[in-house]
Image (cartoon, rainbow, N blue to C red):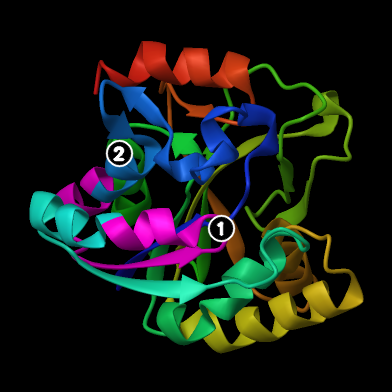
């Protein structure tokens, strides 16, 4: 199993920080970036082969690879997304299909969370796809909301849902087992070909609709944030120093 980080997005709502850097390289604790935290967590969880999907300002990541490898004791492979500024992240994850074919613990490159999330996912390995879910947070419109059946199978994952209907928020961390990789790649391909603006979570929905197993691992009471805008960045800087 490898670590996998999706870090191709432009992060336009974080300008001017992202004028010259991808969102994942925005500092959140001194010189520590969001990507530093992702790599640190994956390494602490025992995943030392890491693939990073890059796109916007990819050169800034490329330049830091030797330092990241030395600092965290990992081996990094890069996958380049040349559509990162045009298409959404269903395509980004699909581009990494040859990498997650060996199984992957995937994290979004804009999420700040403690290593307990990775540990929870690894402790509950078994389902073909396992999603880290915050079922304690009060939800609003922007969150990636989820619904699961009585027997624990994903039935819906979307932002376009009434918060009261949701079980919890998917926080952007997932285990993809090797056994699920080929079918997930097919579902992701169908998703981005249907509409390149779709999220990879729409690919998870397609995979589940086709009969693939997708289940939840609840993360408990954890301080975390998806960094989309300056308010999120302020929260990330408040919590990152505690990890």
Q: Within the magenta stretch, is there residue 111?
A: no
Question: Between residues 45 and 40, which one lies in front from this camera angle?
Answer: 40
Image depth: mark 1 or mark 2 in front:
1
Residue sitting at 78 percent across and 21 percent down?
A: 140
Can you say whether 203 is above or below 7 in the image? below
Quarter where residue 46 is shown? bottom left
Q: How many marks?
A: 2
Residue sitting at 51 percent across and 42 percent down?
A: 20
Q: Are there few (<14), some (14-19), or many (20+) residues within 10 Å of tag 1? A: many
In the image, 72: left or right of 82? left
Q: Which residues are magenta?
A: 40-63
Q: Secondary structure at mark 2?
A: helix
Q: Are there few (<14), some (14-19), or many (20+) residues within 10 Å of tag 2? A: many
Task: Give the farthest residue toward the front.
Answer: 20
Quarter where residue 186 is shown? bottom right
Q: Disc 1 or 2, which lies upstream in sequence? A: 1
In the image, 236: left or right of 43? right
Residue sitting at 61 percent across and 68 percent down?
A: 92
Q: Secondary structure at mark 1?
A: loop
In the image, 210: left or right of 115? right
In the image, 239: left or right of 68? right
Can you say whether 173 is above or below 161 in the image? below
Q: Quadrant of the N terminus?
A: bottom left
The disc at residue 67 is none
**Residue bearing mark 2:** 37
Residue sitting at 80 percent across and 73 percent down?
A: 191
The disc at residue 8 is 1
Can you say whether 47 is above or below 233 in the image? below
């Amino acid at each position: 199993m490898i670590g996998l980080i999706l870090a191709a997005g432009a992060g336009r709502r974080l300008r001017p920080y992202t004028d010259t850097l991808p969102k994942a390289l925005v500092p959140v604790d001194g010189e520590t970036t969001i990507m530093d935290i992702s790599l640190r967590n994956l390494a602490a969880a025992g995943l030392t082969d890491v693939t990073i999907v890059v796109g916007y300002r990819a050169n800034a990541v490329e330049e830091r690879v030797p330092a990241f490898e030395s600092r965290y004791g990992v081996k990094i492979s890069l996958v380049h997304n040349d559509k990162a500024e045009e298409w959404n992240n269903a395509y980004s994850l699909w581009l990494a299909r040859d990498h997650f074919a060996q199984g992957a613990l995937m994290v979004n490159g804009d999420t700040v969370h403690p290593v307990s999330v990775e540990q929870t996912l690894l402790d509950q390995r078994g389902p073909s796809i396992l999603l880290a879910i915050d079922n304690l947070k009060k939800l609003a419109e922007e969150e990636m909301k989820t619904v699961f059946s009585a027997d624990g199978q994903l039935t819906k994952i979307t932002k376009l849902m009434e918060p009261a209907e949701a079980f919890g928020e998917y926080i952007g961390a997932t285990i993809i087992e090797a056994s699920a990789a080929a079918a997930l790649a097919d579902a992701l391909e169908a998703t981005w070909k249907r509409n390149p603006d779709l999220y990879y979570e729409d690919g998870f929905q397609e995979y589940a609709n086709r009969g693939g197993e997708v289940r939840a691992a609840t993360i408990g009471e954890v301080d975390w944030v998806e960094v989309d805008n300056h308010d999120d960045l302020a929260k990330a800087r408040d919590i990152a120093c505690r990890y």
